[in-house]
Every structure is written in C-alpha cells, then in structure tokens.
Image (cartoon, coloured by chain):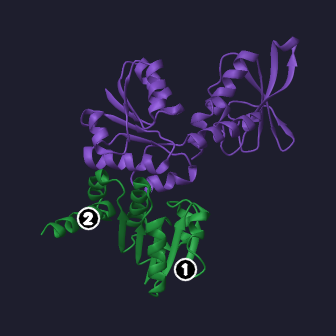
Chain colours: A green, B purple
Amino acid sequence: MYIIIIGCGRLGSMLAEDLSDAGYNISIVDREAKNLDTLGSGFNGLRIKGIEFDNDVLLEAGIKHADYIISATSDDNINITVALIAQKIFKVPRIIARINNPKKKPVYDGLGIETINPTELSVYILKSRIEETLK
Amino acid sequence: MKSIIIGGGKIGSNLLKTLKGRGYNVTLIEKDENVCRKIANDLDADIICGDGSDLAVLNDAGINNADIIAAVTGKDEENLVICQIAKMEFQINKSIARVNYPKNISMFKALGVNQTVCSTEVIANLIEYEFDSDICKIVQTFDRGAMILVEVSVDEKSRWLNCFIRDLELPGESVIAAVLRNGKIIYPRGDTQILKNDNVNLITNQATFLKIKEYMQNGGVSYAKQKK
C-alpha cells in the first residue's frame, strides 16, 4: 500500500512515522525543510520538500501510483487544492483531507472531498468525557 | 453589474478603482485589516475584511447577486478554491483567477477554471516583446528624420508572413521600397509574396513608423495571446 501524506506538521509527521512503522510505503511532502527534519532518522519513507500542490512535486511523490493521499496541512485552501488535483487529475483511489476551520466543511463537502475534522473530534471526545464524570 | 474582488493587493485595489470609475457595483474582500483601512481611506467603496474563501464572508459580499468574481490574492491555492466555490455553490460561471506562478496555469485549467490571468507571465511577455521589437528598425533617416527607411524582419510569427504586397494594410504615408531575400533585392509589385526570413524595406515617416510598429506587434499584450 502506497500512501502520500501532504504536510509534515504535528498531524502529518506523527501519522507518517506511525504508518511507516506499521510497514506501509510512505512519502511525505512539505514546503519547509525543517518540518521534514522533525521526522528523525527512524522514518524510512520518502521526504520531499516543495510546494504541496505543485505538479512536479506530486509526481515526485509518486501520485500516479498512490493508493491513498492524505492532505493534512494546516491550510484549508492547500488541502482542498491538493484533494482536487488528486481527485480530478490523477484519480487517486482514496483521498482524505484535514479540516482546520470547521466553517469550511461545506466547501469540502460540496466538492466531494472526504474529510477528517480534528477539532470536531476533540470537542466530541472532551464533551463525552465531561458527561461521563457527571454520571 | 455586480462584481466581487477578492484580494486587496496591488492588482485588487487597482481593479477596484477602475471598476468603480466605470460605475460598476463592486465589493472587495481582503483579509488584512490594515490593508482594508488603507483602501477605505482612498476610496469610497464596499470593503469587507475577511477570508474570501469562507462561504459566510462571500454571502456577506452579496455573491448571490454577483455576475463576476475576480480572485486576485497572492496565493494560488486560495484563488483556485474561491473559483471552485463560486462555481459549485453559487453557479457563477464568470470567475477569473489570478495565477501567481505560471506553472500552475495548466492545473487551474485541468480543474475547470478557464479564465486565468497570470501577471508574471504577462510581464515576462512584455519584456520579451521589448527585446523582440527590433523586428521593426530604422535603417536610414533622410532629410533630418522627415523621411525614414524602415526594415521589417518577417519571421514565423509575423502578420505579414505569406501575404501578397497588394493585400497589406499599410498606412497612407508609407510605401514598400524593396524586399530583401537571401541577399537579393526584389523590386516589389502587387503580386510579390512575402516569405519567411524576408526583410521588407519601407519608406515612411516617424509617426507612421510607430503605427506600423504597433500594428506589427499589437502592443505586446495581444502579441502574447497570439503566440499561444
């Protein structure tokens, strides 16, 4: 299974390390070299420094034969752009994008992009824990 | 006509001024509060401070009644998303995106944003045109510049390529004196055809020379279009 992760921030880097340890083929893209350095020497996937939605960068990351692409930068517009490119130009089988601003959810939905919403999830978990203690 | 501009940089603010001057109903959306204030001081216009890729902000700007959307921020991903929103949520077919990196133009096209303006490319083409402008040059001046001999080089992009002399639309105060082909002089008649790599010599004056120059190159901008 070949997975491309876009954005090597907190979410992207942790996901990359985890999936790589689990034996998946990973390539990770970020425009900042210092973000890619946070991965450490244990990570044995491909690191690519470049603009996340640049055609050549995505080709270098192997988008043509990727099974999964996860767009996890902290910028919604970059995540949408990458997801659209993966969906319409390269026809990647599965695409998941991270929502940063929950207000932008309708945009992702309208464009048919599958999403994960960390803010919403945190809120849900926090709320259920609070409710648990009240019982 | 109602239009919305997103991005209040050099392009956005100038566009606002121009459209306002022509009496259009324009709203500008800009993220930076200081920039908004600066524009508001200069111009009496509708300015919204907010994220132009946010549905609520676009609704505030009156996107439901808008005819044209111009996404001219400095970020390509933002311009792309705005055009996608305009098309998908509000069925606006006339949206124009500024592309900052010429490399991204094909990506915009592939994702269905057909109207793009790439300032970087336009400027590069204009500069290239300045370099190219020696396809029309003054060879000799007579009578202290009242009459000049001009040489026009014909390349594969020239408007005159494969034309007959009789078909050329020449300004009144000019006449073709000779065509140089492979070092030979051709004394042109109406049925002389202009071929690639010919040098066409014209007798004219300074004012007409400028007109011919402009005609040959279309002022650069359409020359750039022509090239594609």
Residue B143 falls in image quadrant? top right
Residue at 36% across / 33% down in the picture?
B4
At horizontal 52% and vertical 75% (from top left) the residue drawn is A27
Sooner in the amino-acid sequence: mark 1 or mark 2:
1
Q: Is residue B105 above or below residue B95?
A: below
Q: Which of A132 and A98 is in front in this view?
A: A132
Q: How crowded is mark 1: few (under 14 residues within 10 Å), some or many (20 or more)?
A: many
Q: Nearer the viewer, residue B12 or A35?
A: A35
Q: What residue type is labelled 2?
A: Leu
Q: In this view, does A49 lie above or below B206?
A: below
At horizontal 51% and vertical 42% (from top left) the residue drawn is B74
* x and y percentages locating residue A127 in the rendered image: 21, 63
Query: Would residue B162 be visible to someone looking at this image?
Result: no
> Residue A89 is drawn in which quadrant?
bottom left
| Amino acid type shown at disc 1 | Gly
In front: B29, or B226? B29
Rendering coords of residue B27 (x, y %):
36, 29
Which numbered dot is residue B16? none
Q: Mark 1 points at which residue?
A: A45
Residue B71 falls left or right of residue B128: left
The chain to which mark 2 is attached is A
Task: State left or right for residue A123 relative to residue B179.
Answer: left
Depth-wise, is mark 1 or mark 2 nearer the camera?
2
Q: Which residue is at the far bottom?
A: A23
Task: Report the side of A95 relative to B225 (left or right).
Answer: left
Q: How many labels does the image show?
A: 2
Q: Please give the residue where the numbered disc 2 appears in the rendered image.
A: A126
Q: What element carries label 1?
A: loop
Between the residue at mark 1 and the residue at mark 2, the CA separation in whole angstroms equals 34 Å
Q: Can residue B77 be seen in this view?
A: yes
